[in-house]
Image: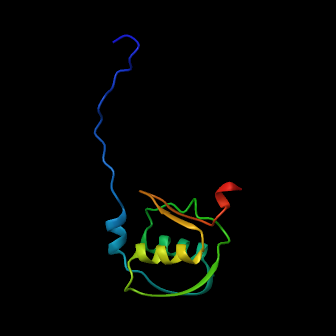
Amino acid sequence: NQGRKERRARDSQATDPTARLHKLRPFGTYANQSVTDVVLDLVARYMPWVTTEYVQTGLTRVSLVLDGNADMRTVFSRLAQALGEGELVVALAAVEFVAAGAAEQ
């Protein structure tokens, strides 16, 4: 065993947030608001356990009417599409919206 690190097994649990996002059906009207503001509002109203620390400011402006038919994952995908080449990352406890090229700056 000399020179080898001891490996220990630990109990851990990770939860995929996708199922939870499918259950959330947001309502709201957003007229010419930045994707930043829409995401911050949706997270505050429907997902208070999620951090918005990594939501980029000053993202593209959108107009959007949410009538409860689309789940949150679909809404976030639509917002990500509005960013053009932007990306949406939904992690265990974070929602991240980043415009294309922002990571390189």
Question: Is 75 or 41 nearer to us in this picture?
Answer: 75
The count of marks equals 0
Q: Residue at x 37, y 80 (%)?
A: 25
The image shows residue 100 at horizontal and vertical percentages of 63, 65
Using residue 64 as the reference point, say whether residue 21 is left or right of it. left
Question: Is 53 or 5 nearer to us in this picture?
Answer: 5
Q: Quadrant of the N terminus?
A: top left
Q: Residue at x 34, y 58 (%)?
A: 16
Residue 59: image quadrant is bottom right
Using residue 74 as the reference point, say whether residue 40 is left or right of it. right
Question: Is 30 or 88 nearer to us in this picture?
Answer: 88
Q: Residue at x 58, y 59 (%)?
A: 54
Colour mode of the rendering: rainbow
- The outermost residue toward the front is 85
- The outermost residue toward the top is 2
The image shows residue 86 at horizontal and vertical percentages of 59, 68
The image shows residue 52 at horizontal and vertical percentages of 54, 63
Look at the picture and state if 44 lies above or below 26. Answer: above
Look at the picture and state if 35 lies above or below 49. Answer: below
Residue 17: image quadrant is bottom left
Q: Residue at x 38, y 20 (%)?
A: 5
Residue 48: image quadrant is bottom left
Q: Quadrant of the C terminus?
A: bottom right
The image shows residue 101 at horizontal and vertical percentages of 67, 62
Using residue 34 as the reference point, say whether residue 3 is left or right of it. left
- The outermost residue toward the right is 105
